[in-house]
Image (tube, coloured by chain):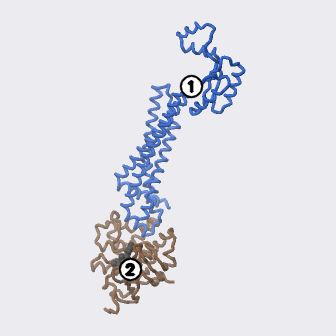
Amino acid sequence: MKPRTWAFCLSEANQNLLRNPVLAIASITTTAVSLLVLGVFLLLSANVNQITTNIESQVAVRAFFDKSTTQAQETAALSTVRGWKDVRSAHVVTAKQALAQLKREFGDQGKVLNSLGSANPLEDSLSVTAKAPVDVAPLAKALGKLTGVVRVSYQSEVVNRLFNLINGIRVVGLGVGVLLLLGALLVINNAIRLGIITRRREIAIMRLVGATESLVHWPFILEGLILGLIGSVIAAGLAWWGYSALYTSAARSLPFLPLVAPTPYASDIAGVLVVLGVLLGAVGFRLSVRRLARV
Amino acid sequence: MQLISLRNVSKVYPNGVAALRGVELEISKGEFTFLVGPSGAGKSTLLRLLFREEVPTSGVVMVNGHDVGRMRRKQIPYLRRQIGVVFQDFRLLPQRTVADNIAFALRVTEVHPREIKRRVAQVLELVGLTERATAVPSQLSGGEQQRVALARAMVGHPLVLLADEPTGNLDPVNASEMMKTLLEINHLGTTVVMATHAAHLVDRARQRVVAMEDGQIRRDELAASYSEGVVR
Ligand SMILES: Nc1ncnc2c1ncn2[C@@H]1O[C@H](COP(=O)(O)OP(=O)(O)OP(=O)(O)O)[C@@H](O)[C@H]1O
Ligand SMILES: [Mg+2]
């Protein structure tokens, strides 16, 4: 089509929007709200993910050796463990180091430990960190099977809860987001349908005088795209601006809780929202094609 | 070669009504043809087959060498650009001006704006509405509205003009004006096929008359009148 024909289609699309402003506003609002909810959940999920990984990397799995284990056996176990692919890092903590650490952690009260004299009740151990939270439980199990290991400890409760939390947020977020998107799709679709009905005379005349089907379709495609685009730009803007503000204030007041940086993550999400919005408009049109054929 | 030819054409609507039954008809370039006959005879159906608003149930409909019934969907718009159509109910766009209504037909077929301007002025002249170019349809009389519809049908320089009861909603004065314009258009070279109940207009025009009844052609005479054997 020629540029002036695109201009014609665009002006027809605009007229549709202006002729049914209530539905246009409803379409834009529902699109914006649903995409915003989706964006918020994506951002939330990314942050929970990051926080868990942070905590996780600090939570090491400890495999304690039997008192009778020789240093050679311990070194052998260490190199075996380092060969596993879900292991981020591993090192031996001797009973002596463990005691020293304990004394340090207790601070002043640690002096009571001096009463132990040269006796050390602690065991040598392997301190192992996993690459991902998912790997922790199987890793602990595998460590328990090593020769000389008598018990394994890790904060499985914390890990599991965080796990469930992330998954919960993902499922709920995705579910709510998808439901809202379907709602937005319905509203956009209705706006386009109403446009088709209000313009049926015009469509009939276009066909009568020999307009191609693509010329008949494009004003409605553009209408869908415009609705989706405006809605998604609003959502993306709000998500981006809101998150940046949150990030700045969080960095000031909660420095120990590092959030995911807005760039590139939030800007990527904003981009995804816009793409989704445009897609929503396109699908909204696609659902009305049969209606358009029957005019 | 005939501009229009129907060979053994039948049309049965989905509801089972047989609107046309074995119609044979040839119309040459430059002819003026009246389609007459009682209500339900199949006149409108025949016209609708010509611009592919409907497809024949059987038989062949040819327009300007194209098998209209078997034409591919993509080609329909190009067929319609060669056919002008006028209806009893005008079918104008109420929010657009007279000039816009006419230009609309050219804009959607991607004609150059300068050419559109030229041709719109030309057809406005032809139908005598140059003065009313900026009026909207609601400000026009029925006769004027029908002339706008006629201008829109003619602005693409069609090979054939189909008119389905174009004077059906007009008073006698406007009807006879419209008839005069149609004959003039035909005189300028456009083939015209007009379905009508207006006996006096048919009788006065002394053109070819195709009389239909029950989906069949009962009579086909040159320089004829509305009713058989009547000479007025
Ligand atoms: N779209 C349709 N669906 C079903 N039946 C139809 C349709 N259009 C017309 N018919 C039927 O086909 C027959 C022929 O109709 P058509 O409109 O061609 O007649 P006509 O000669 O134009 O009549 P009139 O003078 O009243 O305009 C009629 O019985 C009519 O009821
Ligand atoms: Mg009819």
Crowd rating for badge 1 (residues with CA inside 10 Å; few <14, some 14–19, many 20+): some
Q: Secondary structure at mark 1?
A: loop
Which quadrant would the C terminus of chain B be assigned to in this image?
bottom left
Q: How many marks?
A: 2
| Image position, residue B209 (x, y; %) | 38, 86
Q: Is residue A6 left or right of residue A114?
A: left
Residue A258 in sight: yes
* A150 relative to B163, above or below: above
Determine the CA span between mark 2 and mark 1: 89 Å
User: Chain letter of disc 1?
Assistant: A
Some atom of ligand 1 lies within 8 Å of the CB belonging to the residue at label 2: yes
- The blue one among the chains is A
Q: Secondary structure at mark 2?
A: helix
For the residue pair A47 and B184, the one nearer the viewer reads as A47
Residue A193 sits in which quadrant?
Answer: bottom left
Q: Which residue is mark 2?
A: B43
Q: Which residue is mark 1?
A: A154
Colour of chain B, in one word, is brown
Name the amino acid type tagged 1. Answer: Tyr
User: Chain letter of disc 2?
Assistant: B
| Image position, residue B196 (x, y; %) | 34, 81
* A110 relative to B50, above or below: above
Q: Residue at x 61, y 7 (%)?
A: A117
| Image position, residue A286 (x, y; %) | 46, 57
Q: Is residue B146 left or right of residue A75?
A: left
Residue A55 sits in which quadrant?
Answer: top right
* B173 relative to A275, above or below: below
For the residue pair B88 and A7, the one nearer the viewer reads as B88
Callouts 2 and 1 close, C-beta under 8 Å:
no
